[in-house]
Amino acid sequence: MPQPPQDDPSRAAVPPAVARARDVPTLLEALVDADPGRPRLTWYGAGGERVELSARVLVNWVAKTADLLANECDVEPGDVVSLALPPSWRTTVLALAAWCVGAEPSWDGDEGEVLDDLEPQPPAVLVTTADGPVGPAGRVVVVDLPALSRSAAGGPPGALDYNAEVTGRDDVLAVDEQVQDRRVLELADDLARISDFRPGERVLGAAEDLDPDLVLGALRRDGSVVAVAADAGLDLDDLAAQEQATARA
């Protein structure tokens, strides 16, 4: 594995196991090995909702979701998984899971525009909310975003209920190097460098400014992310002090 570029000291300062990660699954495994209990993704939503995912819990969610995509939705390497969802910790988990099975997640903060980008080739899977946009897809998966929700009631006929199904899936992250696109982590490196993320930083920002690829960039630097929904009603400056954030998105 080539060594980090000499002109990128922040990349070189990342712990060796994380720096050596070749793809998204090996990066997630390295984060667990480094410190399984360390918070990696924290979410503030409406109504006082706060979700904190440690490295171990994040990988558990990603593993279960990846198993659902591959074995229930028949997602194959190179397939498109369209995330017609608002910014959320679940959106990030779904994107990470799609990368782990070799698929290409796509997302857009404006739900109404997501399907415009799908022409002419529909995605293998369309993930949406019960009242979200629906279009041509090999499989439709419906998600209810609140953390405590156990069922995503509603959606089109035949849609898969993500909340009800995901908890029973395999929680061991399967790694198949042959299906991995290493350009995903190359992009994450680029985003981390452009954003000036330093090793171990805790990045806080509005959820709409923290797309899954930017979250991956922070993780690539052995960092963590605090994402705040627009309707959370929180002051980001106050929250930055409370969460001990060292950088802003």
Image: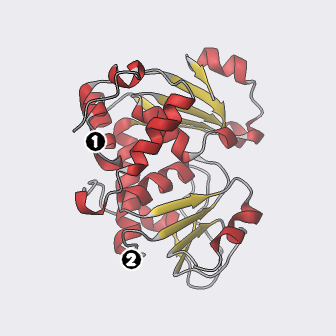
User: Is residue 6 at least partly visible in the picture?
Assistant: yes
Residue found 21% across the figure and 39% down from its top: 1
**Depth check: 179 or 151 in front?**
179
Q: Which residue is mark 1?
A: 29
Residue 153: x and y in percent read: 62, 71
User: Taking 239 as reference, is 53 above or below it?
Assistant: below
> Which quarter of the picture shows residue 119?
bottom right
Name the image colouring. Answer: secondary structure
Q: Which mark is residue 74?
A: 2
Residue 184: x and y in percent read: 42, 49
> Which quarter of the picture shows residue 29?
top left
Compared across the picture, whether 113 is left or right of 157 comes to right
Residue found 34% across the figure and 39% down from its top: 56
* Residue type (three-letter) at the residue carrying disc 2: Asp
Marks 1 and 2, how far apart in space? Answer: 24 Å
Compared across the picture, whether 220 is left or right of 110 comes to left
